[in-house]
Image (cartoon, coloured by chain):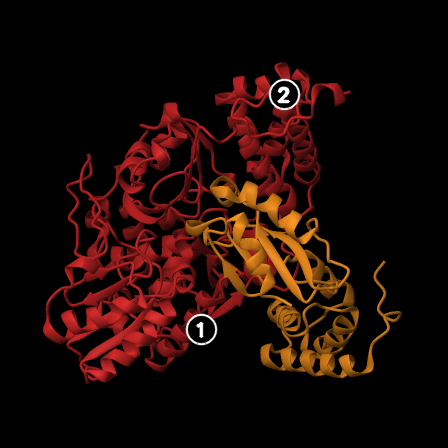
Amino acid sequence: MFKVAEVPSQAGQTKDLTRIVEAAVEKHGAHADAFIPILLEINRDYGYIPAEAIRLARKLLHQPEEHVLVSEGQLYGLASFYHMLHTEKTGRHVVQFCESAPCHVQGGRELWKAIRQTLRLEAGETDPEGRFTLKTVSCLGVCGVGPVMLVDDDLYANVTPEQLTEIFGKYE
Amino acid sequence: MKFSRSMVLVSNDPDSVRLGAQEVYRRFGEKLLELGLSEEVTLAQITDIGRHDALPLVIVYPEATAYGPVTVKDVDRIVEEHLYKGRIAEELLAPVKELSGRIGWLKARKGASPMEKKIVTRRVGRIDPENIEDYIAEDGYQALAKALHMERAEIHALLEKSGLQGRGGAGFPTGMKWRFVASTKSPKKYVVCNADESEPGTFKDRIILEGDPHSILEAMAIAAYCVGADEGYIYVRGEYQLAQRRLERAIVQAREWGLLGKNILDTNFCFDVHVHSGAGAYVCGEETALLESIEGKRGEPRARPPYPTTHGLWGKPTLINNVETLANVPPIVLNGAEWYRSFGTPSSPGTKCYTILGNVNFRGLIEVPMGITLREIINIYGQGMKNGAPFKMAQTGGSSGSIIPASLQDTPMDFESFRRAGVSLGSGALLICDESNCVLDLAITLMKFFQFESCGKCTPCRVGTERALRMLTAISRGEGKLEDLDTLAAIAQEMEYASNCGLGQTAGVPIRDTLKYFRAEIEAHIRLGVCPAGVCEMTPAVERV
């Protein structure tokens, strides 16, 4: 069950979050075709979409007199459906590994094993220090230079297992 | 418009950037300033033009000289020799690709890869995608001007005559689709460009959007005029940030020039376009899921019929075309159906973009006439298999494509011939595998993808992909039974017949093809407990139940 009221919010964070949600709605407008862009914007600025954000966004978006009808459940449905939207807090850095066939054939098989060993994480896990979250991602569309890996917004191409320690070392 | 004597283009796709393209670009700026050439020489960044062997690539026009790979050190030499003294710096030229084979008659343009026939990517890498003037100088928006003086019926008749088929994978006749939408009676209609390119291994649409965004706007305007729409959406997948930025910029410029908006080119035709970002869902490439997503819902495909041509976005008639399909439209309007039919095969005219990947020497994007064979693609464009290893199989069209065994290497690659051979051309990705790859391992990777991306709306796909994946994985560990193969075949068929949308309907294809062409290899995993390619990690016999 999805409940919003029980989520504790830290004072400073909530303030920022309110501003982020308001700015996103302001930018894209309160229309049905703006729901996903708004959630993307919140996700980008806040790192993930907490229940609080959904509650705030729904309040701003639901305007029956304008024929824009939306429930919190619908927004949560979007946030949980699309892979680029996160409903849970992630580590400071998100490592996304492309596990599609082209990368797999071009050395991704060995690389994936090495990534899991280096980070000591399985797909979907975050380390206890909250430094890295490891995720798999479907094709990133840069298969010409596979295997590829995304750390936050930095794309690493033609990655070999030997480069991993150096790459991850750049992220604190 | 400012005129300059030369133009320097520096590639800035992700791979080039990784190899230092930004530094090269910066150094060019400094060096040109130092020699007082900044006024005479234009410097611009371009996207990937499919020369992954020589990145970062620098092209100097008007000579169309390609230098690559260029390092910061080389910049001074290129500027001094080529731009200051007017001599080509021979030692820094990008390696030339060899000309040979059946299709060698195609004229090679300087700067282009030999033997390619470029229609939809002809401007990519040659113009500054962020400048509408560049596009207009290369015949841009001429087709729109021409179309606006044609009868609406004339336009879809022209497309039907040209034989253009949808390039998203299904190969549906484009002209017919346009006619369907044009014939609906609704005051409000939409044109949607499907740029949710998520098929693994496919990035042709990204290259077109990043390198030539105006061509899509122009094609959408022509489409809107033809079918009677006044609003358009471009649904770009969320990961394609650069493409989104460039499209948004292009839309602003087109509005400023009166090529989008009200009364386009002084006619009473009005049309405007929005860019809509996806948020990471493969299933949104399916057209009805895409429409759901624009409407702010989960990307779950609708039941069809009714088809989007009559009940599409917000319930209105909607024309949905793939990026590559649309990019073909302006050249056809401008040059005619006969011209278009002079490329490709009679049943599949025109060109097709392919992305060559896997165990070949050259990986990247090519645009070639329909009907060339896989062998030609591997040996000429792919420059042969890596390390001379024997070719084992190819996987076409991302995950919903087919697995093609070596025996089908010489089948002409067009919609008709492939359909007859029982395989699919798909979206244009060609994943070439040599003998070091295990077909079961490949099938598992593909099935994992479907299982991950299944939207979960209909049961055959949601449960079928999960069951198939578990069964394939067990076989790869040597824990399978021969009966499993029958069960797998049944699951594949059930998914094909009973699934709601294209995702589930094609999810069984890897299983079907694997069992059809590589059954012996799969059985070896079960009967002998070994992986012939030595890829799968077998559970030791003593531990097996």
The shade of chain B is red
Chain letter belonging to callout 2: B
Q: Quadrant of residue A1?
A: bottom right
Residue pointed to by mark 2: B485
At label 2, which amino acid type do we have? Leu
Instruction: Name which residue lies at 70% across and 76% down.
Output: A61
The shade of chain A is orange
Relative depth, front residue between B151 and B511: B511
Relative depth, front residue between B392 and B539: B539
Residue B43 vertical placement versus B369 (above, below): below
**Nearer the observer, disc 1 or disc 2?**
2
For residue A30, side relative to residue B287 (left or right): right
For residue B222, side relative to residue A142 (left or right): left
Quarter of the image with the C terminus of chain A in it = bottom right
Rendered location of residue B485, percent (x, y): 63, 21
Label 1 environment density (alpha carbons within 10 Å; few <14, some 14–19, many ≥20): some
Residue pointed to by mark 1: B248
Instruction: Name which residue lies at 41% across and 72% down.
Output: B271
Say whether disc 1 or disc 2 marks the residue closer to the N-terminus: 1
Residue B346 vertical placement versus A54 (above, below): above
